[in-house]
Amino acid sequence: MSTHERQQAILDLIADAGRVTVAALAARFGVSDDTVRRDLQALADDGVLQKTHGGAVALDVPAMARVPRQRVLAPVKQALGAALAATVTPGQILMLDAGDTLLAVARALPDVALTVITPSLDIAVLLGARPRIRLVLAGGEWCARQRLFHGEAAEALIASCRADVAVLGACAVDVQCGLTATDAADARLKRRMLASAGTRVLVADHSKFERRQPWAVAPLADFDHLYTDRPVALPPTGGPAPAITVVTPPQELTP
């Protein structure tokens, strides 16, 4: 296992458990304590975890800047993006939220004629080179931390459009409270996307569940589909509920 692969595995472990110890990591990977300490220091320097005495703890993922956040559960996000993109059909109008998993969706979109509406600069740059995709960028006030446009102008453009499918990412998901966001502007933009689409899809890896953020977006019942990488138990309500697709990343497949 290379240094990069080991460090990515450490990130995935800490995303699951919330904390790791030097001794446990050294035993797991068959390396010295000093090697693990160097790995943890490198990851801390990259802004993706917090070192502690004898180990490290996870950072609050929704509060992290977009670039370091891309390394957290990267294989899971890629698998989710590929699975969702495989459902896209020619001629569809898509609304894609901002975020790492949504960027993975955009990377995996088939080479067919599509219209994509998005507030994400990274998605716009990626799809701008795809001649068969009609791209609509919902511009507005630039948020450098999240690398998206939001505010009144972005909301107005989204509200004026109609899409076949809206795909939203998640800051936090709770089976009781539904989808919540870290800031009010992001929550408003997500609600606009939901209101403008015929089919509503939520994509969220397991690290986003059993969490709450201050700003409400929508209950899970408002979504038609939920894509995630771990089983989710929704409380019985007798009302509508999203169809759940559990996507297993390649490295987690049982031999």
Image (cartoon, rainbow, N blue to C red):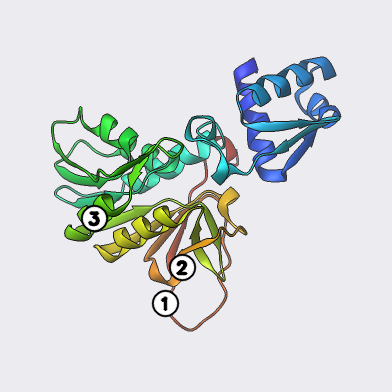
In the picture, measured across the screen, residue 190 lies left or right of residue 116, that is right
User: For mark 1, what is the residue?
Assistant: 240
Mark 2 residue element: helix
Q: What element carries label 3?
A: helix
Q: Label 3 amino acid?
A: Ile
Query: Which of pointers 1 and 2 indicates the residue nearer the eye?
Result: 2
Circle 1 packing at 10 Å, graded few (<14), some (14-19), many (20+), is few
Q: How far apart are marks 2 and 3 (CA)?
A: 21 Å
Q: Residues within 10 Å of mark 3 (few under 14, many from 20)?
A: many
Name the foreground residue: 238 vs 122.
122
From the viewer's perspective, is 171 left or right of 93? right
Q: In which quarter of the image is residue 162?
A: bottom left
Residue 11 vs 183, above or below: the answer is above
How many numbered markers are drawn?
3
Q: In which quarter of the image is the N terminus?
A: top right
In the rendered image, the vertical position of residue 117 relative to residue 163, given as above or below: above
Tags 2 and 3 in contact by the CB under 8 Å rule? no
